[in-house]
Amino acid sequence: MLVVENLVKRYGDFLALKGIGFEIRRGEILGLIGENGAGKSTTIKILVGLLKPDSGRVEYDGMDFFENKSRLKKNIGYVPEVDSLYEDMNAFEYLIFFASLYGVEKRKAGKRAKRLISSLKIPNKKISEFSKGMKRKLSIARSLMHDPDYLIYDEPIGGLDPSTSLFIAEFMKDLKDKAILFSAHNLYYVEFVCDKIAIMKDGKILYYGDLEELKGMQRYVLHYKLDGVEKTFATNDVDALNEFLKEIIPKGRIIKIEVDTPRLEDIYFSLIR
């Protein structure tokens, strides 16, 4: 399990993270969302060891990350927001090279590279000839070559065409044995892929929890007629709806009751505002 507790990070006088925390278990996917400057990339860079927090704690499998960084980094797969690849290699050579850096046995690395190239539909040609979507797929394949338990992805579907974005989202959803954190601006794919959600603003987490629980904030809209006039009553509280119905039923007529389950996009903007 990945545990983040009370992370604080300053850049000079600017407080980028203001004591954030969350957990991710294996088999869960957490979507980290928020406006530009909310603190998402800073959080991710801390989780992969590129930055050190001013205070707070990061644990992988019960071990302090910064006290055991060289050991624990071997169990993390990271995809940065911008792909930086060795473009004079082909896809297979590139994956084998990175597997060797993690000490993966050559035969095992070859089998794994072939499987990932096939699963992600990556052409085995010079990386310099790849489209942006192909490069992103290769970055994801690279992050899996050493078979890590934790995947930390910064905007893995950002700036890609819709079909490639959907392909990568579906691929991530199938990685059921991993603990995955990824940041994204496209809330459709966050809603499609994630089990949990963390909404950030100004270095704080406004909401953290199960996505289905968040979406369970249903809105009830009652349409009724009272004294010959059609009216509406809206609430998120089913008990409040029942109490209102008790008052209206003896006096007026119920026309209909609508139940609206909000989209993640609606909830996100209501919290951010």
Image (cartoon, rainbow, N blue to C red):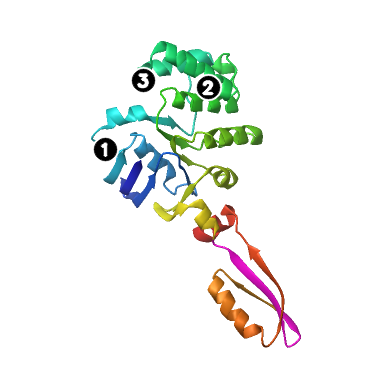
Can residue 253 be seen? yes
Amino acid at dot 2: Leu
Q: Secondary structure at mark 3?
A: loop
Answer with left or right where residue 222 lies relative to residue 206.
right
Q: Is residue 231 magenta?
A: no
Any mark on residue 116, and which? 2
| Vertical arrangement, residue 133 with respect to residue 268, above or below | above
- Residue 272, percent from left and from top: 50, 58
Q: CA distance from mark 1 to mark 2?
A: 30 Å
Residue at position x 43%, y 44% in the image: 40
| Vertical arrangement, residue 151 with respect to residue 207, above or below | above
- Residue 43, percent from left and from top: 38, 43
Amino acid at dot 3: Tyr
Residue placed under numbered mark 3 in the picture: 102
Sequence order check, earlier mark of 1 and 2: 1
| Vertical arrangement, residue 210 with respect to residue 78, above or below | below
Q: CA distance from mark 3 to mark 1?
A: 20 Å
Give the residues drawn in magenta, as a range: 217-230
Q: Is residue 222 magenta?
A: yes
**Toward the viewer: 267 or 53?**
267
Residue at position x 58%, y 57% in the image: 266
Mark 1 surroundings within 10 Å by alpha-carbon count, few (fewer than 14), some (14 through 19), many (20 or more): some
Any mark on residue 63, and which? 1
**Toward the viewer: 4 or 255?**
255
Mark 2 surroundings within 10 Å by alpha-carbon count, few (fewer than 14), some (14 through 19), many (20 or more): many
Q: Secondary structure at mark 1?
A: strand
Amino acid at dot 1: Met
Sequence order check, earlier mark of 3 and 1: 1
Q: Secondary structure at mark 2?
A: helix
Mark 3 surroundings within 10 Å by alpha-carbon count, few (fewer than 14), some (14 through 19), many (20 or more): some
Q: In the picture, which quadrant includes the N terminus?
A: top left
